[in-house]
Image (spheres, grey):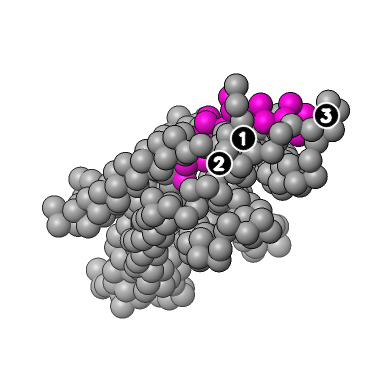
Protein backbone atom coordinates (compact mmCIF):
# COMPACT_ATOMS: atom_id res chain seq x y z
CA UNK A 1 0.00 0.00 0.00
CA UNK A 2 1.55 3.31 -1.14
CA UNK A 3 1.43 6.44 0.99
CA UNK A 4 -0.64 9.42 -0.18
CA UNK A 5 1.06 12.10 -2.21
CA UNK A 6 3.06 14.56 -0.11
CA UNK A 7 3.26 12.28 2.95
CA UNK A 8 6.84 11.48 4.02
CA UNK A 9 7.89 7.89 4.74
CA UNK A 10 7.25 6.67 8.29
CA UNK A 11 10.12 7.08 10.79
CA UNK A 12 11.84 4.13 12.49
CA UNK A 13 9.82 2.21 15.10
CA UNK A 14 9.45 4.06 18.36
CA UNK A 15 10.01 7.48 16.78
CA UNK A 16 7.83 10.07 15.09
CA UNK A 17 8.22 13.41 13.35
CA UNK A 18 8.11 16.58 15.44
CA UNK A 19 5.65 18.12 12.97
CA UNK A 20 3.21 15.23 13.46
CA UNK A 21 3.44 15.43 17.25
CA UNK A 22 3.07 19.22 17.24
CA UNK A 23 0.00 19.13 15.00
CA UNK A 24 -1.73 16.61 17.28
CA UNK A 25 -0.98 18.32 20.60
CA UNK A 26 -3.44 21.15 19.96
CA UNK A 27 -6.43 18.88 19.16
CA UNK A 28 -5.54 16.66 22.11
CA UNK A 29 -5.36 19.57 24.55
CA UNK A 30 -8.64 21.08 23.36
CA UNK A 31 -10.40 17.72 23.54
CA UNK A 32 -9.15 17.09 27.09
CA UNK A 33 -10.24 20.56 28.25
CA UNK A 34 -13.77 20.36 26.90
CA UNK A 35 -14.18 16.68 27.73
CA UNK A 36 -13.25 17.46 31.33
CA UNK A 37 -15.91 20.19 31.42
CA UNK A 38 -18.69 18.08 29.91
CA UNK A 39 -18.65 15.45 32.66
CA UNK A 40 -19.36 17.79 35.64
CA UNK A 41 -21.87 19.70 33.52
CA UNK A 42 -23.77 16.49 32.89
CA UNK A 43 -23.84 15.75 36.62
CA UNK A 44 -24.94 19.31 37.42
CA UNK A 45 -27.67 19.15 34.81
CA UNK A 46 -29.24 16.10 36.47
CA UNK A 47 -28.78 17.43 40.01
CA UNK A 48 -30.46 20.78 39.35
CA UNK A 49 -33.24 19.47 37.14
CA UNK A 50 -36.68 18.55 38.40
CA UNK A 51 -38.62 15.43 37.32
CA UNK A 52 -40.90 17.68 35.30
CA UNK A 53 -37.96 19.29 33.49
CA UNK A 54 -36.41 15.90 32.66
CA UNK A 55 -39.52 15.00 30.66
CA UNK A 56 -39.29 18.07 28.46
CA UNK A 57 -37.70 17.97 24.97
CA UNK A 58 -35.24 20.74 25.86
CA UNK A 59 -33.68 18.55 28.57
CA UNK A 60 -33.40 15.51 26.29
CA UNK A 61 -31.77 17.61 23.56
CA UNK A 62 -29.29 19.01 26.08
CA UNK A 63 -28.30 15.52 27.19
CA UNK A 64 -27.89 14.39 23.57
CA UNK A 65 -25.77 17.47 22.81
CA UNK A 66 -23.57 16.74 25.79
CA UNK A 67 -23.11 13.11 24.73
CA UNK A 68 -22.30 14.34 21.22
CA UNK A 69 -19.60 16.61 22.64
CA UNK A 70 -18.11 13.77 24.70
CA UNK A 71 -18.03 11.57 21.60
CA UNK A 72 -16.29 14.30 19.61
CA UNK A 73 -13.65 14.73 22.31
CA UNK A 74 -13.08 10.98 22.55
CA UNK A 75 -12.65 10.64 18.78
CA UNK A 76 -10.28 13.62 18.68
CA UNK A 77 -8.12 12.14 21.43
CA UNK A 78 -8.13 8.72 19.75
CA UNK A 79 -7.16 10.29 16.42
CA UNK A 80 -4.30 12.25 17.97
CA UNK A 81 -2.96 9.24 19.86
CA UNK A 82 -3.19 7.09 16.74
CA UNK A 83 -1.35 9.74 14.71
CA UNK A 84 1.46 9.96 17.26
CA UNK A 85 1.89 6.30 18.13
CA UNK A 86 0.61 4.30 15.15
CA UNK A 87 2.01 6.64 12.44
CA UNK A 88 -0.62 7.59 9.84
CA UNK A 89 -2.99 4.81 10.92
CA UNK A 90 -5.79 7.07 12.08
CA UNK A 91 -8.13 6.70 9.10
CA UNK A 92 -10.72 4.76 11.12
CA UNK A 93 -11.20 7.78 13.42
CA UNK A 94 -10.91 10.63 10.91
CA UNK A 95 -14.17 10.05 9.02
CA UNK A 96 -16.42 9.76 12.14
CA UNK A 97 -14.68 12.79 13.67
CA UNK A 98 -15.21 14.82 10.50
CA UNK A 99 -18.89 13.83 10.38
CA UNK A 100 -19.53 14.75 14.02
CA UNK A 101 -17.59 18.02 13.78
CA UNK A 102 -19.56 18.95 10.67
CA UNK A 103 -23.05 18.16 11.92
CA UNK A 104 -22.52 19.13 15.58
CA UNK A 105 -23.31 22.85 15.11
CA UNK A 106 -26.60 22.06 13.34
CA UNK A 107 -27.63 19.52 15.98
CA UNK A 108 -26.71 21.75 18.91
CA UNK A 109 -28.42 24.76 17.38
CA UNK A 110 -31.61 22.72 17.09
CA UNK A 111 -31.88 23.25 20.86
CA UNK A 112 -31.98 26.97 20.17
CA UNK A 113 -34.76 26.43 17.67
CA UNK A 114 -36.78 24.64 20.38
CA UNK A 115 -36.41 27.72 22.59
CA UNK A 116 -37.68 29.90 19.74
CA UNK A 117 -40.63 27.52 19.38
CA UNK A 118 -41.38 28.07 23.09
CA UNK A 119 -41.26 31.85 22.66
CA UNK A 120 -43.46 31.77 19.54
CA UNK A 121 -46.18 29.15 20.27
CA UNK A 122 -47.60 27.66 17.09
CA UNK A 123 -51.23 27.95 18.18
CA UNK A 124 -50.97 31.60 19.28
CA UNK A 125 -49.28 33.28 16.29
CA UNK A 126 -50.51 34.25 12.84
CA UNK A 127 -49.57 32.54 9.58
CA UNK A 128 -47.25 35.38 8.66
CA UNK A 129 -45.44 35.11 11.98
CA UNK A 130 -45.11 31.34 11.49
CA UNK A 131 -43.36 31.91 8.17
CA UNK A 132 -41.01 34.45 9.73
CA UNK A 133 -40.30 32.49 12.94
CA UNK A 134 -40.22 28.94 11.55
CA UNK A 135 -39.99 29.03 7.74
CA UNK A 136 -36.75 31.00 7.37
CA UNK A 137 -34.78 29.04 10.03
CA UNK A 138 -35.94 25.70 8.60
CA UNK A 139 -34.83 26.71 5.08
CA UNK A 140 -31.45 27.79 6.44
CA UNK A 141 -31.02 24.49 8.33
CA UNK A 142 -31.86 22.45 5.23
CA UNK A 143 -29.37 24.44 3.15
CA UNK A 144 -26.68 24.01 5.80
CA UNK A 145 -27.28 20.26 6.04
CA UNK A 146 -26.98 19.84 2.26
CA UNK A 147 -23.80 21.93 2.16
CA UNK A 148 -22.28 19.96 5.05
CA UNK A 149 -22.99 16.70 3.21
CA UNK A 150 -21.16 18.04 0.15
CA UNK A 151 -18.23 19.18 2.30
CA UNK A 152 -17.95 15.79 4.03
CA UNK A 153 -17.91 14.10 0.62
CA UNK A 154 -15.01 16.32 -0.42
CA UNK A 155 -13.11 15.43 2.75
CA UNK A 156 -13.63 11.72 2.14
CA UNK A 157 -12.46 11.90 -1.50
CA UNK A 158 -9.48 14.20 -0.92
CA UNK A 159 -6.16 12.26 -1.11
CA UNK A 160 -4.30 12.21 2.17
CA UNK A 161 -7.16 13.72 4.15
CA UNK A 162 -7.29 10.72 6.47
CA UNK A 163 -3.70 10.95 7.68
CA UNK A 164 -4.54 13.09 10.74
CA UNK A 165 -7.29 15.40 11.93
CA UNK A 166 -5.42 18.63 11.15
CA UNK A 167 -4.72 17.62 7.55
CA UNK A 168 -8.32 16.49 7.06
CA UNK A 169 -9.57 19.92 8.09
CA UNK A 170 -6.88 22.10 6.51
CA UNK A 171 -7.30 20.59 3.05
CA UNK A 172 -10.91 21.78 2.90
CA UNK A 173 -10.64 25.20 4.51
CA UNK A 174 -9.93 26.76 1.11
CA UNK A 175 -13.00 25.16 -0.50
CA UNK A 176 -16.12 27.22 -1.08
CA UNK A 177 -18.35 24.74 0.76
CA UNK A 178 -16.62 25.49 4.06
CA UNK A 179 -16.98 29.24 3.64
CA UNK A 180 -20.61 28.80 2.59
CA UNK A 181 -21.30 26.80 5.75
CA UNK A 182 -19.71 29.47 7.96
CA UNK A 183 -21.71 32.19 6.20
CA UNK A 184 -24.99 30.28 6.54
CA UNK A 185 -24.23 29.55 10.18
CA UNK A 186 -23.62 33.25 10.86
CA UNK A 187 -26.85 34.24 9.09
CA UNK A 188 -28.81 31.49 10.88
CA UNK A 189 -27.55 32.41 14.34
CA UNK A 190 -28.05 36.13 13.73
CA UNK A 191 -31.60 35.65 12.50
CA UNK A 192 -32.62 33.41 15.40
CA UNK A 193 -30.92 35.78 17.84
CA UNK A 194 -32.96 38.69 16.53
CA UNK A 195 -36.18 36.69 16.91
CA UNK A 196 -35.43 35.76 20.51
CA UNK A 197 -34.03 39.14 21.59
CA UNK A 198 -36.99 40.99 20.08
CA UNK A 199 -39.38 38.81 22.09
CA UNK A 200 -37.25 39.32 25.19
CA UNK A 201 -37.41 43.08 24.73
CA UNK A 202 -41.19 42.87 24.52
CA UNK A 203 -41.28 40.87 27.75
CA UNK A 204 -39.02 43.38 29.51
CA UNK A 205 -41.25 46.31 28.49
CA UNK A 206 -44.32 44.35 29.52
CA UNK A 207 -43.00 43.61 32.99
CA UNK A 208 -41.87 47.21 33.51
CA UNK A 209 -45.24 48.71 32.58
CA UNK A 210 -46.85 47.72 35.87
CA UNK A 211 -45.69 46.89 39.38
CA UNK A 212 -46.50 43.27 40.21
CA UNK A 213 -47.17 41.72 43.58
CA UNK A 214 -44.66 38.93 42.92
CA UNK A 215 -42.17 41.14 41.08
CA UNK A 216 -39.17 39.15 42.34
CA UNK A 217 -40.40 35.99 40.64
CA UNK A 218 -40.87 37.64 37.27
CA UNK A 219 -37.66 39.63 37.57
CA UNK A 220 -35.88 36.32 38.03
CA UNK A 221 -37.71 34.95 34.99
CA UNK A 222 -36.64 37.89 32.81
CA UNK A 223 -33.07 37.54 34.10
CA UNK A 224 -33.11 33.86 33.13
CA UNK A 225 -34.28 34.76 29.64
CA UNK A 226 -31.46 37.29 29.36
CA UNK A 227 -28.82 34.67 30.23
CA UNK A 228 -30.44 32.24 27.81
CA UNK A 229 -30.20 34.85 25.07
CA UNK A 230 -26.55 35.61 25.82
CA UNK A 231 -25.34 32.02 26.14
CA UNK A 232 -27.51 30.48 23.43
CA UNK A 233 -27.54 33.14 20.75
CA UNK A 234 -25.04 35.98 21.18
CA UNK A 235 -21.95 33.87 21.96
CA UNK A 236 -22.46 31.41 19.04
CA UNK A 237 -23.03 34.41 16.78
CA UNK A 238 -19.68 35.91 17.77
CA UNK A 239 -17.91 32.57 17.32
CA UNK A 240 -19.41 32.14 13.86
CA UNK A 241 -18.13 35.57 12.87
CA UNK A 242 -14.62 34.78 14.16
CA UNK A 243 -14.74 31.42 12.39
CA UNK A 244 -15.60 33.11 9.09
CA UNK A 245 -12.85 35.71 9.48
CA UNK A 246 -10.05 33.22 10.14
CA UNK A 247 -10.86 31.37 6.92
CA UNK A 248 -9.36 34.30 5.01
CA UNK A 249 -6.11 34.37 7.04
CA UNK A 250 -4.20 31.89 4.87
CA UNK A 251 -5.00 28.70 6.81
CA UNK A 252 -2.53 26.79 4.61
CA UNK A 253 0.20 28.17 6.87
CA UNK A 254 1.11 25.68 9.59
CA UNK A 255 0.85 28.05 12.56
CA UNK A 256 -2.41 29.59 11.36
CA UNK A 257 -3.84 26.14 10.62
CA UNK A 258 -3.47 25.15 14.27
CA UNK A 259 -5.52 28.14 15.42
CA UNK A 260 -8.12 27.61 12.71
CA UNK A 261 -8.55 23.98 13.74
CA UNK A 262 -8.85 25.04 17.39
CA UNK A 263 -11.64 27.50 16.54
CA UNK A 264 -13.51 25.02 14.34
CA UNK A 265 -13.40 22.31 17.00
CA UNK A 266 -14.08 24.62 19.94
CA UNK A 267 -17.06 26.34 18.31
CA UNK A 268 -19.58 23.47 18.71
CA UNK A 269 -18.15 22.65 22.15
CA UNK A 270 -18.72 26.21 23.37
CA UNK A 271 -22.23 26.14 21.91
CA UNK A 272 -22.94 22.96 23.89
CA UNK A 273 -21.70 24.60 27.10
CA UNK A 274 -23.76 27.73 26.44
CA UNK A 275 -26.92 25.71 25.91
CA UNK A 276 -26.24 23.75 29.10
CA UNK A 277 -25.61 26.88 31.16
CA UNK A 278 -28.96 28.27 30.05
CA UNK A 279 -30.74 25.04 30.97
CA UNK A 280 -28.96 24.77 34.33
CA UNK A 281 -29.84 28.40 35.07
CA UNK A 282 -33.49 27.75 34.33
CA UNK A 283 -33.39 24.47 36.27
CA UNK A 284 -31.99 26.25 39.34
CA UNK A 285 -34.97 28.64 39.27
CA UNK A 286 -37.36 25.68 39.12
CA UNK A 287 -35.47 24.05 42.02
CA UNK A 288 -35.79 27.21 44.15
CA UNK A 289 -39.49 27.43 43.36
CA UNK A 290 -40.09 23.79 44.26
CA UNK A 291 -38.24 24.14 47.57
CA UNK A 292 -40.26 27.08 48.81
CA UNK A 293 -37.89 29.97 48.27
CA UNK A 294 -40.74 32.36 47.49
CA UNK A 295 -41.60 35.07 50.01
CA UNK A 296 -44.71 34.21 52.06
CA UNK A 297 -47.81 36.23 51.29
CA UNK A 298 -49.33 36.13 54.81
CA UNK A 299 -48.07 37.45 58.11
CA UNK A 300 -49.44 37.05 61.68
CA UNK A 301 -50.41 40.28 63.46
CA UNK A 302 -50.55 41.10 67.17
CA UNK A 303 -53.52 42.81 68.88
CA UNK A 304 -53.75 44.31 72.39
CA UNK A 305 -57.05 44.01 74.32
CA UNK A 306 -58.33 46.16 77.25
CA UNK A 307 -56.88 43.82 79.86
CA UNK A 308 -53.34 44.36 78.51
CA UNK A 309 -53.29 40.78 77.34
CA UNK A 310 -51.39 40.13 74.09
CA UNK A 311 -53.04 37.69 71.72
CA UNK A 312 -52.22 36.56 68.22
CA UNK A 313 -54.77 37.58 65.62
CA UNK A 314 -55.53 35.50 62.54
CA UNK A 315 -53.12 35.73 59.65
CA UNK A 316 -53.87 38.60 57.30
CA UNK A 317 -52.57 39.00 53.77
CA UNK A 318 -50.29 41.88 52.89
CA UNK A 319 -52.30 44.91 51.75
CA UNK A 320 -51.30 46.67 48.54
CA UNK A 321 -53.13 49.91 49.44
CA UNK A 322 -53.25 52.15 52.52
CA UNK A 323 -55.82 51.60 55.29
CA UNK A 324 -58.80 53.95 55.32
CA UNK A 325 -62.29 54.14 56.81
CA UNK A 326 -64.95 52.59 54.61
CA UNK A 327 -68.67 53.34 54.75
CA UNK A 328 -70.92 50.42 53.82
CA UNK A 329 -72.56 50.87 50.44
CA UNK A 330 -70.08 53.53 49.30
CA UNK A 331 -67.24 52.54 46.98
CA UNK A 332 -64.00 54.16 48.07
CA UNK A 333 -61.49 55.40 45.45
CA UNK A 334 -58.74 53.23 46.92
CA UNK A 335 -60.89 50.11 46.62
CA UNK A 336 -61.76 50.82 42.97
CA UNK A 337 -58.12 51.52 42.13
CA UNK A 338 -57.08 48.30 43.85
CA UNK A 339 -59.58 46.30 41.80
CA UNK A 340 -58.33 47.80 38.51
CA UNK A 341 -54.73 47.17 39.49
CA UNK A 342 -55.59 43.60 40.42
CA UNK A 343 -57.08 42.98 36.99
CA UNK A 344 -53.98 44.39 35.28
CA UNK A 345 -51.74 42.28 37.48
CA UNK A 346 -53.70 39.15 36.64
CA UNK A 347 -53.37 39.88 32.92
CA UNK A 348 -49.66 40.56 33.33
CA UNK A 349 -49.11 37.36 35.28
CA UNK A 350 -50.86 35.38 32.56
CA UNK A 351 -48.66 36.87 29.82
CA UNK A 352 -45.41 36.53 31.74
CA UNK A 353 -46.24 32.97 32.76
CA UNK A 354 -46.10 32.01 29.09
CA UNK A 355 -42.44 33.01 28.86
CA UNK A 356 -40.11 29.96 28.76
CA UNK A 357 -37.38 29.33 31.31
Between disc 3 and disc 2, the foreground one is 3
Q: Residue furthest left?
A: 127
Earlier along the polypeptide chain: callout 3 or callout 2? Answer: 3
Report the disc number at residue 12: 3
Query: Which residue is located at x 55 percent, y 41 percent?
Result: 168
Determine crowd level at label 1: few under 14, some 14-19, many 20+ residues with C-alpha closer than 10 A. many
Q: Mark 1 near mark 2, Cβ–Cβ under 8 Å? A: yes
Q: Quadrant of residue 152?
A: top left
Magenta stretch bounds? 84-105
* Structural distance between the alpha carbons of marks 1 and 2: 7 Å
Write down the residue under mark 1: 163
Instruction: Identify residue for label 2.
Output: 168
Marks 3 and 2, how far apart at CA: 24 Å
Name the spot of residue 225 as percent of width and height, x first. 47, 58
Residue 184 location (% of width, % of height): 36, 56
Badge 1 element? loop
Amino acid sequence: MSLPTGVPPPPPPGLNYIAVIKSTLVPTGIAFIFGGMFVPLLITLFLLSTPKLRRQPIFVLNVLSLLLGLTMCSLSISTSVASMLLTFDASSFIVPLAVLTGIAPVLVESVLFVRVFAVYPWSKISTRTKVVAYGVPIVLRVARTANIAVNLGLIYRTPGSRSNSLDASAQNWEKYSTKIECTLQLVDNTYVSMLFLWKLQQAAKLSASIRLKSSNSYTRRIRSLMWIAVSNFVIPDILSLVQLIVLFLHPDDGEVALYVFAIFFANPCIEIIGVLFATVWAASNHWQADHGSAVPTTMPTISLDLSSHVAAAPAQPYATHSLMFHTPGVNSPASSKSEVTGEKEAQMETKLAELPV
